[in-house]
Image (cartoon, rainbow, N blue to C red):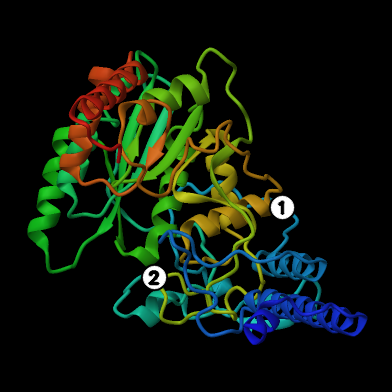
């Protein structure tokens, strides 16, 4: 009994024991602090394998990183290397967009690391092969050249859309040639002129060409154009890596044929866009139109993706900076009508990049125009928001919709838009009473 009682009693806490325990605790805390510091250090090193992979959302190109004065300086120098400062602003082109260089620019080299002749020089990559034929990924990734005013040829155009009136809003919708169902769904829903409630409204689909052998597809697109008169098409190959050309085609169309439009939105064919909420709550037609305005889902502090296997890979020799400037997700951004010509003109002196939304952000940086944050951070979403009529009546964009889903949810929203959140509260209350009556647990 004495043995058991003696070994069950607590150890006597002498000064030596207390000091030993204190040292043990301090050593443990120091070790944890060191491990955390090492983790922070390595988590922000772009050279680590797989570190620059895309974020959870597939539209984010890489992980965010801590900013530093050195990183900001490198970004500033690199951006200066992406464009050439000229004494005179390039004249507005009378023709259309092209990725082919003029004769005098064929051997031009881009200065990286700031202005002046002392910077390291990087030769312009083979532009004639890069975006015109697009036979291989390597050719499509040849994005080191500059755009000039030598045109891609218009296959389909709508030059008289703004002849009789000046629209309040133009929708530029990037679509693939074979997405006829998506285009028809948009015409029935958020791209229908009825959403503008008497305001001037133009909806245009931006297309390149499909495979050269697919003449049946092209004939169907031309017939679709004759029926709806809402397709703009030029003769570049319609691929992901040509989205920048597609967007600049739309910018140039606005600047050439509809320069006095109040606002423009560029978006994609798999988006849900609440155009009514966009017009009434964000653009506010009762107010004077803004100037030099650009907004959307802001992407801040993103680093170029250096993983060669990634869809969003950015070669360091093309974009050597550690950070992209602030840009808006290409799934949907809105800008004042005057910005179309400004962005297009800026693009004429900036090397083309295949990441369209990043490239537009670089054009804005050259123009010294920072995208404005939307009044509500939940207005623009470059992911799919779970549907409820209450949520969708208070947002502008949601991503990844099939044509049948778009029609279904749009019709539901229209039938509930005046009491969307009231109905949602009633439904929630009804489900609660049902569970309580049947003794069910809430989910």
Q: How far from the left and from the top, in percent, is residue 413? A: 27, 25
Q: Does 16 appear above or below 59? A: below
Disc 2 versus disc 1: distance between alpha carbons? 28 Å
Quarter of the rendering occupied by the N terminus = bottom right
Task: List the residue tagged with mark 2.
Answer: 131
Q: Does residue 138 appear left or right of residue 191 in this picture?
A: right
Q: Residue at x 51, y 63 (%)?
A: 147
Q: Does residue 124 appear left or right of residue 195 in this picture?
A: right
Q: How far from the left and from the top, in percent, is residue 117? A: 80, 78
Q: Residue at x 18, y 43 (%)?
A: 403
Nearest to the eye among marks 2 and 1: give it: 2
Q: Say what secondary structure mark 1 lies in.
A: loop
Q: Earlier in the sequence, mark 2 or mark 1?
A: 1
Q: Residue at x 61, y 84 (%)?
A: 47
Q: Nearer the viewer, residue 137 or 89?
A: 137
Dot 2: few (<14), some (14–19), or many (≥20) neighbours within 10 Å?
many
Q: Quadrant of residue 8?
A: bottom right
Q: Does residue 314 appear left or right of residue 189 in this picture?
A: right
Q: Nearer the viewer, residue 12 or 56?
A: 12
Dot 1: few (<14), some (14–19), or many (≥20) neighbours within 10 Å?
few
Q: Say what secondary structure mark 2 lies in.
A: loop
Q: Residue at x 40, y 32 (%)?
A: 170
The numbered disc on residue 88 is 1
Q: Quadrant of residue 404?
A: top left
Q: Does residue 21 appear left or right of residue 159 in this picture?
A: right
Q: Does 116 appear above or below 207? A: below
The extreme left residue here reads 216
Q: Quadrant of residue 115?
A: bottom right
Camera sees residue 229: no
Q: Are marks 2 and 1 in contact (CB under 8 Å)?
A: no
């Amino acid at each position: 009994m004495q043995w058991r009682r003696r070994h069950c009693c607590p150890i006597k806490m002498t000064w030596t024991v207390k000091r030993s325990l204190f040292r043990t605790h301090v050593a443990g805390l120091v070790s944890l602090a060191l491990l955390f510091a090492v983790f922070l250090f390595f988590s922000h090193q772009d050279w680590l394998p797989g570190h620059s992979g895309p974020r959870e959302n597939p539209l984010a190109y890489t992980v965010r990183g801590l900013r530093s004065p050195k990183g900001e300086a490198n970004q500033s120098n690199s951006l200066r290397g992406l464009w050439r400062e000229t004494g005179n602003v390039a004249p507005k082109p009378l023709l259309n967009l092209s990725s082919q260089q003029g004769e005098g620019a064929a051997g031009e080299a881009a200065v990286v690391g700031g202005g002046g002749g002392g910077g390291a020089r990087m030769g312009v990559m083979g532009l004639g092969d890069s975006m015109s034929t697009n036979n291989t990924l390597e050719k499509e990734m040849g994005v080191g050249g500059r755009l000039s005013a030598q045109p891609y040829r218009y296959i389909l155009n709508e030059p008289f859309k703004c002849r009789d009136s000046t629209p309040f809003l133009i929708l530029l919708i990037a679509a693939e040639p074979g997405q006829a169902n998506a285009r028809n769904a948009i015409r029935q829903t958020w791209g229908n002129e009825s959403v503008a409630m008497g305001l001037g409204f133009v909806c245009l689909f931006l297309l390149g060409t499909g495979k050269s052998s697919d003449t049946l597809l092209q004939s169907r697109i031309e017939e679709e154009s004759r029926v709806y008169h809402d397709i703009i098409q030029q003769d570049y190959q319609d691929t992901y890596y040509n989205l920048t050309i597609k967007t600049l085609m739309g910018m140039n169309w606005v600047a050439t044929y509809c320069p006095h439009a109040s606002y423009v939105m560029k978006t994609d064919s798999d988006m849900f866009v609440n155009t009514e909420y966009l017009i009434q709550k964000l653009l506010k037609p009762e107010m004077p139109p803004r100037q030099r305005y650009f907004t959307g889902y802001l992407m801040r502090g993103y680093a170029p993706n250096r993983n060669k296997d990634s869809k969003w890979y950015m070669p360091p020799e093309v974009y050597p900076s550690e950070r992209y400037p602030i840009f808006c997700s290409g799934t949907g951004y809105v800008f004042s009508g005057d910005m179309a010509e400004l962005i297009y003109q800026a693009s004429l002196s900036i090397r083309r990049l295949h990441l369209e939304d990043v490239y537009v952000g670089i054009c804005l940086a050259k123009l010294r125009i920072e995208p404005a944050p939307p009044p509500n951070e939940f207005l623009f979403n470059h992911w799919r928001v779970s549907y409820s009529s209450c949520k969708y009546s208070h947002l502008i964009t949601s991503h990844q919709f099939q044509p049948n889903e778009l029609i279904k949810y749009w019709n539901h929203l229209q039938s509930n838009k005046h009491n969307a959140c009231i109905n949602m509260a009633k439904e929630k209350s009804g489900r609660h009473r049902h569970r309580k009556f049947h003794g069910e647990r809430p989910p």
